[in-house]
Amino acid sequence: VPDDYFVLSQNVSFQYYELNNYNTGLFTFGNGSSKNLSYTIALTRNSKGVNPVFPTYGSEFSVSGKFTPPYSLFNGIDYADLENQAKYKVRAAEAGTDPDGANYPAGAYLDEDGYQVSQYSDAATDQGKVDQKRFNWLEFYKIKFKGDWYTRLFDKLVLRSLGEFGYMGAYNQDRGLVPFERFYLGGDGLANYSLDGRETIQLRGYPNQSLSPVNDDGEQVGATIYNKFSLELRYPITLKQAASIYALTFLEAGSAYNDFKDYNPFNLQRSAGFGLRVFMPAFGLIGIDFAHGFDAIPGQTAKSGWQTHFIIGQQF
């Protein structure tokens, strides 16, 4: 409904993350755990045809939403006040000495310079403990849209037009955006494994996952917003049952952002290139792309230049 091309899908999932010395730019608590209970709903209309390996007409539109329960609405925790509470202050794990050589006992409250303080309110905040509490149950929502068109231009020459958009938000700004489930843009888009639920988005002409925002230390921290646009010309070399082979050339542009304050749909990293795809029933899809990135990746000044991407098992 309203036609045979529509599919409505829903799922409920639970993920448990146990962090052990996972000290990256996004995570202030390198040791701890987080739980993710979420509901996903997606509506897709796919009329691509007739060959699934090399569509020559039709389109695919999809919109999806992923939602966790809004725990902060009913758990009674004031997340804006966590940094002022005694149990989230820095305390000495064992007895030691301050920078002046004075002794302090185990459990003493310490300020940012390592000196003992008499009042916990004067102690430094242990950000790792604060964030462990903020993210013990993940709370977020994620909206994604994708539009994919196929148009026959002449004979067997086909134009593929693609647009994508993704956004992740927070119900409670005091609790903030989670460090999990973020978008990592750039490269071949292949995700061999996922340590923190990240989504890898293809944008050829740049190193893998290189177009995400960076923190003050130059570390990739993942994006909460991304957009991507692509134009791809395809021409088949052979479409036989034993092997389907086609050549392609493309223009792509996209970018990723921390939040809507930084969002600019016209400030994009651009690339162009060419490639080859081979599909065999025994091996699936394999391919290679040569792409030139015209812009610099975040945190650098030199343009990306030529990059080689190997494609294995990705969608057509």
Image: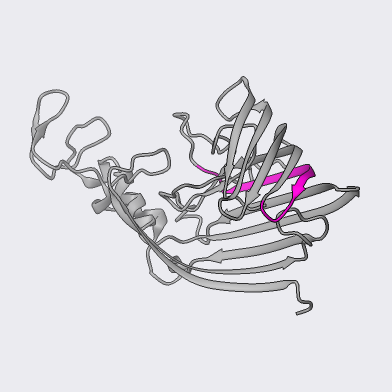
Farthest top residue in view: 302
Expressed as whole percent of the image width and height from the top left, the position of residue 108 reads: 14, 42
Quarter location, residue 206: top right
Identified at 46% across, 55% down, the residue is: 174
Visible in this render: residue 187? no
Instruction: Say whether residue 292 is left or right of residue 231.
Output: left
Viewer-side residue, 175 vs 209: 209
Q: Which residues are magenta?
A: 222-242
Quadrant hosting residue 287: top right
Residue 313 pos. (x, y %): 57, 50
Instruction: Please identify the quadrant where the N terminus is shown.
Output: bottom right
Residue 9 lies within the magenta run: no
Closer to the camera in the image, 12 or 97: 12
Identity of the residue drawn at 47% across and 47% down: 192
| Front-lying residue, 125 or 163 | 163
Magenta stretch contains residue 238: yes
In the rendered image, the residue lying farthest to the bottom is 1
Rendered position, 305 above or below 89: above
Q: Is residue 172 above or below residue 129?
A: below
79 or 258: which is nearer to us? 258
Instruction: Report the number of discs.
Output: 0
Q: Position of residue 52 (x, y in %)?
A: 71, 59
Find the residue positioned furthest to the right.
154
Colouring scheme, one of rainbow, by chain, secondary structure, one colour: one colour
**Residue located 73% across and 53% down the image:** 240
Q: Is residue 85 visible?
A: yes
Characterize the magenta stretch by its predominant secondary structure.
strand
Quick check: 38 above or below 105? below
In this picture, residue 107 sits left or right of residue 145: left
Instruction: Give the residue drawn at x 63%, y 46%.
Output: 226
Say whether residue 71 is left or right of residue 17.
right
Left-right relation of 22 to 107: right
